[in-house]
């Protein structure tokens, strides 16, 4: 008996953030019956993407008091479902563009085909290659790339913590961590911040936060299973010293989650998908990209 061909979808959407759900809502309203793959801890982040790692969203219309990242992503999802979007909590592993309709495979083994594909897979927080901070060191044992996800862990409470970065994310994470840590260092390679004035002012006004400008973390240290100290270096004087620290958080930007389509879809040197001017269309027919 011949193997049954996978169902052909009108449109498959990959992602779970605001761009993915906007695409889902519009295509559902157009009666295209979209199928959305929201990912299962894709890039180590829960469905909902980077918004789930944000404490308060203050710049989205309709929420004068602000709204938590988790709550707003739940609302996005509920609206998509209400419009008729079907959602699978699976991560896409590959897309075969060799024949049309395109074949889409998930890590769970689900195989589908589609006439159109919307890539809204977002980005994953970058990690730094610091001795002692990797998978064979204190990663997830005191080292993290998500303060909102991990900051409330018992072994961070009442302890000195450190955030690496100089942008808005670093300011937000450091401010959030002051709820739990006894002190929060912000380590910045340069002598200025990239963060917006509002976020800078908020961080500087917090008595628990100390800025270490022109510094770098050179090693994560600990005598047991958990992080205990950091070796830091003054980049101007070359002086090194050790500080007590039980939590190290990276807030240094993101890498796009596009590796599963980069063999066919044009990307820039950082891996972000290139779209045509004033359009979401890519170089591949029927393939569109949006969001981060």
Image (cartoon, grey):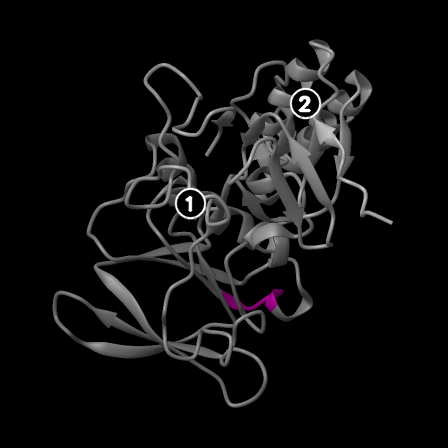
Q: Residue 242: x, y in percent? A: 34, 79
The stretch of residues the image draws in magenta is: 156-160
Quarter holding residue 241: bottom left
Quarter holding residue 199: top left
Image disc number at residue 10? 2
Q: Look at 19% across and 51% down and name the residue there.
A: 191
Q: Earlier in the sequence, mark 1 or mark 2?
A: 2
Q: Look at 70% across and 39% down and name the residue there.
A: 112
Q: Which residue was labeled with disc 1?
A: 262
- Let me know if residue 65 appears in the view: no
Q: Look at 42% across and 41% down and name the residue there.
A: 264
The image shows residue 51, relative to residue 192, as above or below, that is above
Q: Residue 272: x, y in percent? A: 38, 39
Magenta segment includes 55: no
Q: Look at 49% across and 46% down and name the residue there.
A: 257
- Let me know if residue 201 appears in the view: yes
Residues 52 and 24: in front is: 24
Residue extending furthest left? 237
């Amino acid at each position: 008996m011949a193997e049954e061909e996978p169902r052909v979808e009108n449109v498959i959407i990959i992602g779970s953030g605001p761009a993915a759900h906007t695409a889902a809502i519009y295509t559902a309203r157009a009666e295209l019956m979209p199928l959305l793959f929201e990912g299962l801890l894709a890039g180590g982040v829960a469905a909902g993407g980077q918004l789930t790692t944000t404490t308060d969203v203050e710049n989205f219309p309709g929420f004068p008091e602000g709204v938590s990242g988790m709550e707003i992503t739940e609302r996005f999802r509920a609206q998509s479902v209400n419009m008729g979007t079907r959602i699978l909590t699976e991560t896409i592993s590959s897309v075969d563009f060799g024949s049309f309709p395109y074949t889409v495979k998930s890590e769970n083994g689900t195989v589908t085909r589609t006439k159109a594909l919307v890539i809204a897979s977002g980005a994953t927080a970058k990690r730094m290659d610091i001795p002692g901070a990797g998978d064979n060191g204190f990663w997830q044992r005191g080292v993290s790339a998500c303060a909102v996800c991990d900051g409330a862990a018992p072994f961070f409470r009442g302890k000195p913590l450190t955030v690496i970065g100089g942008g808005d994310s670093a300011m937000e994470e450091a401010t959030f961590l002051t709820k739990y840590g006894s002190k929060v260092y912000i380590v910045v390679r340069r002598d200025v911040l990239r963060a917006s004035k509002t976020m800078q002012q908020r961080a500087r006004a917090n008595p628990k936060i100390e800025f270490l400008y022109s510094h770098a973390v050179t090693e994560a240290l600990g005598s047991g299973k958990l992080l205990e100290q950091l070796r830091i270096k003054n980049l101007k004087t070359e002086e090194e010293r050790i500080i007590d620290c039980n939590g190290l958080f990276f807030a240094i930007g993101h890498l796009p989650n596009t590796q599963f389509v980069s063999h066919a879809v044009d990307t820039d040197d950082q891996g972000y998908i290139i779209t045509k001017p004033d359009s979401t269309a890519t170089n591949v027919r029927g393939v569109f990209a949006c969001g981060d």
